Image (cartoon, rainbow, N blue to C red):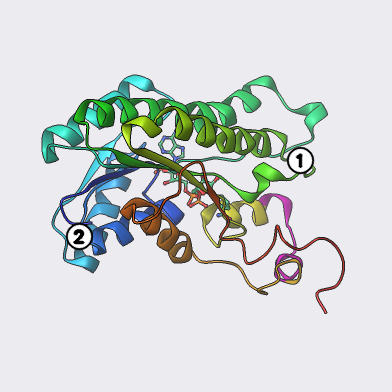
Amino acid sequence: MHDQTAVVTGSSSGIGFAIAREFASRGANVVINSRSEDRAATAANEITDETGNESVIPIEADVTDPDSLGELVDQTVERYGSLDVWVNNAGINIRGPAEDMSLSDWQQVIDVNLTGAFSGAQLAGQRMIEQGTGGSIINVSSMMGEQGQTGRTPYNTSKGGVNNLTRCLAVEWAEHDIQVNAISPGYIRTDMVDDAQDQIGFDEQDVIDRTPLGRFGTPEEVANCAAFLAEREHFMTGEILHPDGGWLSFGWGSKS
Ligand SMILES: NC(=O)c1ccc[n+]([C@@H]2O[C@H](COP(=O)([O-])OP(=O)(O)OC[C@H]3O[C@@H](n4cnc5c(N)ncnc54)[C@H](OP(=O)(O)O)[C@@H]3O)[C@@H](O)[C@H]2O)c1
């Protein structure tokens, strides 16, 4: 990824951090983003220390604020001269019964996961179209975007939206050689999953038993999918990759 400039939203921790580190290890200029300048700077320093790549910078921005996302794009281009890869990774989950869900909780999840992804893709797409050199936009969705579940209506709905956002933008921007794809991970051990375990106390063994590969995935395994999509040595656009250990392929019943 030498000479490529990549922005990863929500890369202070978890999957976003692993994607940013993978891009940095492949030689890209990488922008780390968080709502906190400190968290972004800490992550950027850690990645530089680990990979030896000095072209890793932190930029604070909130994906629900289009002005701050615009600043993120402008500062990236000012620093590195181009924008080639954009990853919409920032995401949150608010759980609860649908009948009691407040509209503000619903809106918060949609604002970050879906509208944030659209705003980011729109700004990145505008820049890539202006550059005329194509690009890769990667949306981090979730296998839950293709599933009904109790207590997760805003999250699962937002990710279903992200999947079709991916298809629409892929078709619309193909003429500009911008490839738009999504990654829909299964259960990956991160703060988000730890929070879920604290809040709703799901049974870890249940997840392991439900997953054909018999374990949680790692952020690094998702990051490898992102690097594959970012390097653009493939013919895919509008595609949704599923690093889920076979979770979606498994219907119902015992694995044995
Ligand atoms: N873990 C899983 O099992 C799993 C499975 C499927 C999909 N996913 C998806 O993977 C993505 C990353 O999740 P994760 O598991 O790595 O969770 P995580 O560790 O909680 O990371 C979430 C990241 O999003 C950032 N963020 C949240 N709201 C933001 C906002 N408004 N603006 C900018 N950044 C924001 C956070 O940064 P700050 O708090 O520093 O701002 C953090 O870096 C999400 O889209 C999630 O839906 C995760």
Label 2 is placed on what type of residue?
Answer: Gly
SS under mark 1:
loop
Residue on which the image places disc 1? 151
Q: CA distance from mark 1 to mark 2?
A: 41 Å
Assess mark 2: CB under 8 A from ligand 1?
no
Query: Is residue 62 visible in this depiction of the protein?
Result: no
Residue at screen point 62% across, 67% down: 245
Identify the magenta region: 199-208
Closest to the observer: 155 or 236? 236
Tell me: residue 132, above or below residue 185.
Answer: above
Secondary structure of the magenta portion, mostly? helix
Q: Amino acid at mark 1?
A: Gly
| Marked residue nearer the N-terminal end (1 or 2) | 2
Res 27 label: 2
Q: Residue at x 25, y 64 (%)?
A: 25
> Which is more toward the observer, 142 or 48?
142
Does 193 sit above or below residue 79?
below
* Residue 20 at x, y percent in the picture: 32, 54
Against 116, is 67 above or below? above
Is 202 magenta? The answer is yes
Q: Label 1 neighbourhood size at 10 Å, few (<14), some (14-19), many (20+)?
A: some
Residue 242 lies left or right of residue 254; in this view the side is left
